[in-house]
Amino acid sequence: MKLSVAANLLFVVLCSFRLAQATEPFAGEELKQIDFQGHSWVGRDVAALEKTSYLGDDALRMTSASMTSFAYVDELDFRSGSVEMDLASVGRSVASIGFFGSADGKQFDRLIINRLRRFDENGSHRLRQAVVTMNKEISIVLNVYATRNQDGDEGDLQNWIHVRLELNQNRLKVFIDDDDTPAFETGGVFDQARSGRIGICGSPCLIKNFRAMPH
């Protein structure tokens, strides 16, 4: 278990370090645009942004071209309120939510949803998490257990997972599936001076049922 914790924290640090080196702005980059489920999505520095079908549902799939690839909802300035969506990842990728990007697109914070199989019967829905700050960016890795199916077994790690974020000034609460208790809560770490962009990162990452309710 100690080795697993060390490996996870090493992943977070390396991921955040690579993000901190990114300097490519929005200006001059090729942007992809697509309408999906009532929202206009913009892909910055993405290899692909396309509609698809995943597990029988309509989905939007983003494939990254680099560590700074980001698909966000156009003309949405989200600074406080709640936002929810269904996310899925394919293969060894992890679904990630990007938010509070800088106006020039050089930086954005991210919430990484890492699906794990249950290690013991008494474990909570949340296993562990880490918040890492690198060069004005916040990287949150939230490890959650796969949802059990009707047979009592862990569901496929590539199934959809429902995520709800509640943002109030600089305080963040993260709810997984239909839980009433937040899986993660933190505050005092976000720079509200940055833009209110919100979207997805990670590759490949799939999303459906995006809904934002700003205050």
Image (cartoon, grey):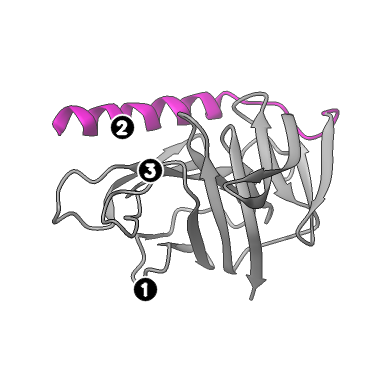
Q: Verify CB contact (< 8 Å) between mark 2 and mark 1.
A: no
| Residue 35 image offset from top left, x and y in percent | 82, 52
In the rendered structure, the answer to whether residue 142 lies left or right of residue 162 reads left
| Residue 183 image offset from top left, x and y in percent | 34, 60
- Where does label 1 land, which residue? 180
Amino acid carrying mark 1 in the image: Asp
Residue 18 highlighted magenta (yes or no): yes
- Where does label 3 land, which residue? 115
- Nearer to us of marks 2 and 1 is 1
User: Which span of residues is magenta-colored?
Assistant: 1-29
Q: Which mark is residue 8?
A: 2
| Residue 96 image offset from top left, x and y in percent | 53, 43
- Nearer to us of marks 2 and 3 is 3
Residue 28 highlighted magenta (yes or no): yes
Looking at this view, is 114 or 18 the one in front? 114
Residue lying farthest bottom? 215
Quarter location, residue 48: top right
Q: Earlier in the sequence, mark 2 or mark 3?
A: 2
